[in-house]
Each structure stands twice: as C-alpha cells, then as structure tokens.
Image (cartoon, coloured by chain):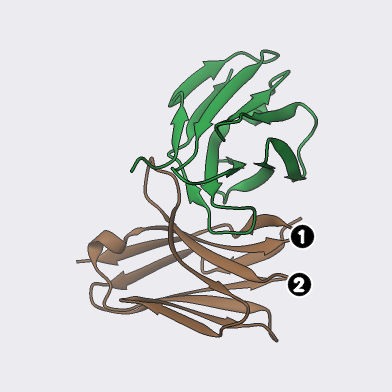
Amino acid sequence: DAGVTQSPTHLIKTRGQQVTLRCSPKSGHDTVSWYQQALGQGPQFIFQYYEEEERQRGNFPDRFSGHQFPNYSSELNVNALLLGDSALYLCASSPGPHYEQYFGPGTRLTVT
Amino acid sequence: GENVEQHPSTLSVQEGDSAVIKCTYSDSASNYFPWYKQELGKGPQLIIDIRSNVGEKKDQRIAVTLNKTAKHFSLHITETQPEDSAVYFCAAEINNDMRFGAGTRLTVKP
C-alpha cells in the first residue's frame, strides 16, 4: 500500500516565476492538506481540499492556490515566487477532513 | 499567530531514560491533538494522537496525556533508544486547521 507521494522531490525557481507541486494521497484517503515548513520550524497550514473544493485556508496570500482532482490527487500552485517562499512543502492526506493526517516526504523548493 | 507552544526546544537523554515533551494550546474548542516524529530529510510521521474525550493514550513505549482544563498535553517516551532521536512536533486542530508547535529536537545518547 503506497503512502502519500509528492513530486518533484526538489526544484529551484527564480523570483517571480510560478511553480506547481503535486501530491497523490494514501489509498482510501479523500482529503488533502498542504503545509509549508520553513527550516527549523513546524509546518504551517496552507489549505485543505475535500470533494474537489478548498474547505479551509490558513494565513497565506492568494498567490497560493490549489486544486483537487476526481481521483483525490492534488496540486499546489504558487505564483510570483518570493525568496521567502523557499521551504519544504508537505502534503498530508486523511480519510476525511477531521481524521488523522499522514504526510508525504515533501518537495524542497528553493527560490533564488 | 502562534497558537501552540512546545517545550523544550532541545532535549538530550541517555539511552533507557524517559523523555517528556510538553505543549500548550490557546483555543478551548480544540479537540484533536496528534504528535509527529520527523527525521532528517523526511516528512512528519504520525506516532500517536489523542482526542479530547480521553485523558491518556498509550502505544507501547509512547504515551500522550491531555489536560483540557489547563489546555496542555504531553508526550512521554519510555526506555528511549538511539533510533528515537528526531524532531518531534505536537499539533492541535484549531478552527478546523492544524497548528503545529515549533518542534523539539530529541537526542538519545547510546
């Protein structure tokens, strides 16, 4: 049984560019949450997707957007990248909005 | 702002000793409190969780206690082993989103 998978593992972007990160949830899970983890800090909640809709959002600007597909996989898009967007982006899946979350390995984004 | 405070930020114990990590939260409506272990280069791994209708939960060497009145919860690891060395995060579901503490770096010396 595959766990949560994320792609790519690493990527480097230039300030002002746009990036798309991808997540496939654990089998049987229909809810996906995205987090940003800066170095040495705990994960910060970005948003959660359930039934292909954003159901909850953290304190992140509109430059951060997402999508959930009918197969429950999800994308995180970040526009107009800033140096401060450099972080580990984590995806977590759960068998419902208020159930235990299981994290993927993350995507390390570096903005130069 | 920060809604979950975690202490200590670093903890060093001798193999076989116990380790305790404590967290406090601000929203009395919170009802779900997971703990995660994160090893270098990996995503957080759920190790134990507790809901507000119970005060304590155990899983082998790991236990979590919850005091809803005081709004704090703790992770207890007994008989620590070198492979327990990692960063541990507490979290609380607040206003339908998950808020994490800043983490505790646990080092278990052989």
Q: Is residue B64 above or below residue A12?
A: below
Please give the count of numbered marks on the rendered protein.
Answer: 2
In the image, residue A80 above or below residue B25:
above
Crowd band around label 1 with a 10 angstrom C-alpha radius: few (<14), some (14–19), many (20+): few
Kind of residue indicated by mark 2: Ala
- Colour representing chain B: brown
Q: Confirm whether residue A40 shows in the render.
A: no
Helix, strand or loop status at disc 1: loop
Tell me what hue chain A is rendered in. green
Front-most of residues A26 and A56:
A26
* Residue displayed at 61% across by 13% down: A14
The residue nearer to you, when weighing B68 against A38, is B68
- Taking the view exactly as shown, the residue that stands out farthest to the left is B110
Could you say whether the residue bearing mark 2 is in a helix, strand or loop? loop
Q: Residue at x 46, y 23 (%)?
A: A8
Circle 2: is it few (<14), some (14-19), or many (20+) Cα within 10 Å?
Answer: few
Residue at (51, 69) in percent of width and height = B8
Whether callout 2 and callout 1 share a subunit is answered yes
Amino acid marked by disc 1: Asn
To which chain does the residue with label 2 belong?
B
C-beta proximity under 8 Å, tags 2 and 1: yes
Is tag 2's residue or tag 1's residue first in the polypeptide sequence?
2
Which residue is label 2 attached to? Answer: B29
- In this rendered view, identify the residue nearer to me: A49 or B75: A49
How far across and down, in percent of the image, does residue B83 sit?
Answer: 25, 60
Residue B95's disc is 1
Residue A39, percent across and down? 53, 41
Image coordinates of residue A87 in percent, x first then y, are 56, 34
Give above or below for A18 relative to A4: above
